Image (cartoon, grey):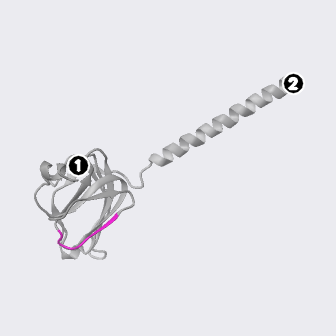
Amino acid sequence: MKTIIKISTLFLTIIIFACTNKQSEKAMIHKTELAFPKGDQITNNNFTGTAWLQMLVSNDSIYTTSIGNVTFEPGARTNWHKHPGGQILLVTEGTGYYQEKGKPAQQLHKGDVVKIPPDTEHWHGAAHNNGLTHIAISPNTDKGSVVWLQPVTDEEYNNIK
């Protein structure tokens, strides 16, 4: 009888361990899932470094808004640019920077929201050693689309304090 109890206890312990381990694996997998797809690598000249874009809402005449999920590798950034209808950034992962022309750069963290007024020349991107993901909302696209300007130089980027 004692042998049966010992075997039953051992069997129960193995089952509990296996179930707990499986739940931990599921929790880890869940933590690494992205809210939105990473999208396609951006291959135009409006970015420095490697970045990806997944359009979530394409501009149309009813909503006059475009929304994209943008992921930057460490050191990647946009060129200077402006939006005639303004822009809103919702930081969902990582650390990065936002800078308006003539002002100091602001550090960005997960959960930050940046409201960029219409026609404000700016850039945004990842920190030197950390990636950044944000949702980029471009409202009022009936006023015009993004106006791309010159790249953010390495000197400008490396002098961020």
Residue 22 lies left or right of residue 140; in this view the side is right
Q: Is residue 45 magenta?
A: no
Q: Is residue 75 left or right of residue 2?
A: left
Question: Regarding mark 2 in the picture, which secondary structure is present there?
Answer: helix
Q: Residue at x 39, y 60 (%)?
A: 111
Q: Name the residue at 51% across, 43% down.
A: 28
The answer to which quarter of the image holds residue 20 is: top right
Q: Residue furthest right?
A: 1
Magenta residues, start to end: 113-120
Residue 41 drawn at (x, y percent): 25, 48
Location of residue 6 with respect to 117 vertically, above or below: above
Q: Is residue 6 above or below residue 144?
A: above
* Residue that numbered label 2 is attached to: 2
The front one of 71 and 123 is 123
Q: Mark 2 Cα within 10 Å, few/some/many (few <14, many 20+)?
A: few
Count residues near mark 1 (Cα–Cα under 10 Å), then give few for <14, some for 14-19, many for 20+. many
Judged from the image, the secondary structure of the residue bearing numbered disc 1 is loop
Q: Quadrant of the N terminus?
A: top right
Q: Is residue 117 above or below residue 21?
A: below
User: Quick one: which residue is furthest to the left in this view?
Assistant: 150
Estimate the spatial distance between the alpha carbons at disc 2 and disc 1, rounded to whole Å.
65 Å
Point out residue 112 in the picture as x, y percentages from the top left corner: 36, 62
Image side of residue 94 versus residue 6, left or right: left
Residue designated by label 1: 76
Question: Does the stretch in magenta take in 115?
Answer: yes
How many numbered discs, if any?
2
* Residue type at tag 2: Lys
